[in-house]
Image (cartoon, rainbow, N blue to C red):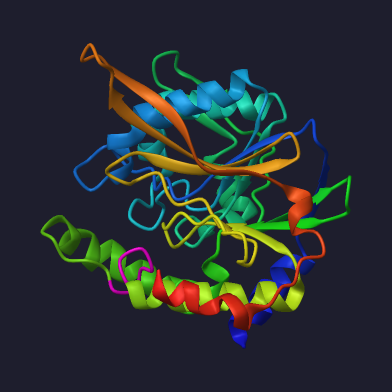
Amino acid sequence: MRANKRLTKALKHASVISFDKNSKYIFFSDCHRGDDSVSDEFIRNQNIFLHALNYYYKEGYVYVEAGDGDELWEYKNFSVIRLAHTDVFTVMKKFYDAGRFIMLYGNHNIYLRSKHFVESNYYEYYDEYNQKKVDLFRGLEPKEALVLQYKDTGQNILVIHGHQGDFMNDQLWFFSMLLLRYLWRYFHLVGFDNPTSPARNMFKRHKIERIYGEWIAKQKIMLICGHTHRPKFPKADELPYFNTGCCIRTRGITGIEIKNGEILMVDWRIAAAEDGCLQILRTVVRGPVPIEKYDGMKFDYFKTHKRYDDE
């Protein structure tokens, strides 16, 4: 019940943005950008992510980072993250300066709900080479939730990180953060998984997805989120629950796109061409499906929830 109330509260206080068939959005989440050490899982996909961002910038997309972009649980000093991934932040700044960047916070970067923390860390940084302060994301206002309202039908799509349905990573986030920073971070390096993370715990992941399903059926709204690290695109008779996956998989990154009034899931990875040259490829995994398809559909959770348990 607490999780349902948290999701409903996020919806109630979400920023609302209208879009139409000419709008383009790309949703990535769970980058967990670190310090370029052995514990930084993002580093193996940094070049893939950078190439994908450049593609979306040139194509005119709005980039929505749906939480856990920076790994602030493990690395309390944001400056080491920025220095480790300078090229990525350079492209993200291009989106921001063009008015095409929206940052949501998740549990691993929940510090972004503090205006003081954002002003102190994200507004500007000190350029040691030129020995002066340089703007980064001046005026940035990270959000907990975003509602995209489709002009053609009036449909609403809630975009959140998804930790709102996870007790240990929401109400008890500070305790979970301490465990990760001082215990599980080091255990993970030698092969142990953090049991509080839905990305590592199948039981927790299925439980959270059941909460999503119940809430979607009750609110009758489309949902895009991350947090579980498991890509999800609904089949024909399933509830409109979309999960971006994550950017720290060994095989590449996944994301959700909206363009031409349609929604689709994409996969970016390194593949070998016939001549042996390596290349970064964008592949459509599911969709595209017209957003109108989910207008007025039967949001019957009890008809579809067993699928979430069995997958």
**Residue 61's image quarter?**
top right
Residue 135 can be seen in this image = no
Left/right placement of residue 282 relative to residue 147 reads left
Q: Quadrant of the C terminus?
A: bottom left
- As drawn, 196 above or below 267: below
Q: Position of residue 249 (x, y in %)?
A: 32, 46
- Image: magenta residue range: 195-201
- Measured as percent of width and height from the top left, residue 19 is found at 81, 41
The residue positioned 70% from the left and 24% from the top of the image is 98
- Residue at 41 percent across and 53 percent down: it is 72
Of residues 306 and 36, the one nearer the viewer is: 306
**Residue 255, position as x, y percentages in the image:** 51, 43
Q: Is residue 11 left or right of residue 113?
A: right
Q: Is residue 239 left or right of residue 281?
A: right
The residue drawn where x is 38% and y is 52% is: 76
Q: Is residue 208 above or below residue 296?
A: below
Which residue is at 31% across, 28% downward? 270
Q: Position of residue 208 (x, y in %)?
A: 49, 74
Toward which corner of the image does residue 12 lie, by quadrant? bottom right
**Residue 263 visible within the image:** yes
Q: Is residue 306 in the magenta section? A: no
Q: Quadrant of the N terminus?
A: bottom right
Predominant SS along the magenta part? loop
> Of 275 and 109, which appears nearest the observer?
275
Magenta-drawn stretch contains 197: yes
Q: How many marks?
A: 0
Residue found at the far left of this picture: 190
| Position above or below: 152 against 145 | above
Query: Which of the 4 quarters of the picture holds residue 250?
Result: top left
